[in-house]
Amino acid sequence: MSGTERKLGEIGFAGDDDVVPFEVAALDVRGRVVQLGPMLDQILARHDYPEPVARLVAEACLVTVLLGTSLKFDGKFILQTRTDGPVDMVVADFATPRSLRAYARFDEERLAAAIAAGETAPEKLLGNGVLALTIDQGEHTQRYQGVVALESTDLQEAAKTYFRQSEQIPTDVKLSVGKLVLPGSGGREHWRAGGLLAQFLPKAEERMRMPDLPGGDGDPIATPQEVADAAWQELLALVATVEDEELLDPAVGSERLLYRLFNEHGVRVFEATPVEDRCSCSEQRIRGILEGFTAEEIVESTEDGVIRVNCEFCSKAYVFEPSEFSARA
Ligand SMILES: [Zn+2]
C-alpha cells in the first residue's frame, strides 16, 4: 500500500472542483477527470430544484466542465438542451478560465406527474429534442455549434454521439451524480458528481475507423464500441469497471481513480484546472438589455413601481427604477 501512496503523492491530488487532464500514451488515449463537490453543491442549493432536476443539471455541469476546460483560447462553452419532456431546457456554460453556471427550466405539473409515476430517469425528463454544444470565442469570431438529437437519451450518451458525429473521435464518457453525507457536515447531504472523458487519438487515423467498411455509403463513423482497435477496446473495458460511487467518492479522488485504471499502462497527469461557481451577470449588463426596451416594454416590465430582474443562472435579484429608462424613451 505504501508504494501506491508514494506514486500518488508524486502526481499530487487535485481534489474537488479541479479538472484533471491525463494521457495514457500506450493506449493512445487522452482525457479528463473531475469530481465536483462544494461548487456543485452551492449551485444546486441556490436553485433548490426537485431532486431529479438537480441531477440533470449536475450532469450538464459535468459535461460542460469536461469539455469547456479543454478550450485553448479565451471564450465560452455552452451546453443547451431543448426538448419536449417535463424538463424542456437545461443550460450550463463555462467561461474561461474557470467560471461555471447552470440552470434548468421545467413544467411543474408535468414534473410532478413524472415523479409520481417514477419516471425520473434523465432521458425520461428530457424527452426528445436536441442537445447543442456551442463554442463562442467572443464578439468578432464565428460561433461554432454542434447539434445532436436527444431521443430518449441521457447526456452521457448524447456526448458520445456528439464526438462521433461532429468530431469523429471515438470517445467514452462516464458520469455519476449523487448525494453524500460527508464527515463533519452535521448529517446534511451534499451534492457531488464525478465525470470521466476519454478519447482515442492514435497517430494513424484508420485505427479510429471500423474495419472492413463498405466504401462510400452508409454511416462511415463507428460508434465507440465498434472501433475494433485493441488499445481502444482495452480502454473501454477499463472504464466499464468504474463504479458510480467510485467516480464521485472524495476518498477516491481523480488521481487515485486514474492510477487504479491505468497504472499498468502508464498514465501521465497534467496540471489541473480549478472550476468555480461564478455567474457573469451584472447590473451593467442587465441595464444594457433594458436600455434596448421600448417605452411600452418598460411599462410592462414595471411592477409596484420598480423593474425586478432575476438572473436565471444564479438567482441574483436586480432592481431598477423605470424612470431611468422611460426618461430616455
Ligand atoms: Zn447571474
Image: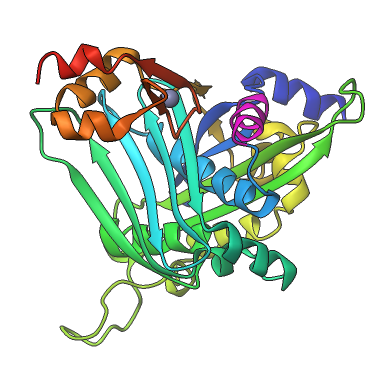
Residue 40 on the magenta span: yes
For the record, the magenta segment spans 37-47
Q: Is the image coloured rainbow, by chain, by secondary structure, or in one colour?
A: rainbow
Which of the 4 image quadrants contains residue 117?
A: bottom right
206 relative position to 152: left or right: left
Q: Quadrant of the N terminus?
A: top right
- Rendered position, 192 above or below 207: above
268 relative position to 279: left or right: right
Q: Position of residue 39 (x, y in %)?
A: 61, 26
Q: Position of residue 58 (x, y in %)?
A: 58, 43
| Res 119 seen here | yes
158 relative position to 33: left or right: left
At x 65% / y 38%, what residue is drawn? Answer: 48
Q: Looking at this view, is 256 or 91 the one in front?
A: 91
Q: Looking at this view, is 27 or 270 the one in front?
A: 270
209 relative position to 100: left or right: left
- Count how many numbered circles sit on residues in the image: 0
At x 72% / y 52%, what residue is drawn? Answer: 244
- Rendered position, 293 above or below 271: below
Q: Looking at this view, is 328 or 152 the one in front?
A: 328
Quadrant position of ligand 1:
top left
| Res 293 seen here | no
- Rendered position, 106 above or below 23: below
At x 79% / y 24%, what residue is drawn? Answer: 5
Q: Position of residue 191 (x, y in %)?
A: 71, 37
Q: Quadrant of the C terminus?
A: top left
Residue furthest to the front in view is 304
The secondary structure making up most of the magenta span is helix
Q: Looking at this view, is 246 or 129 the one in front?
A: 129
Which of the 4 image quadrants contains residue 20?
A: top right
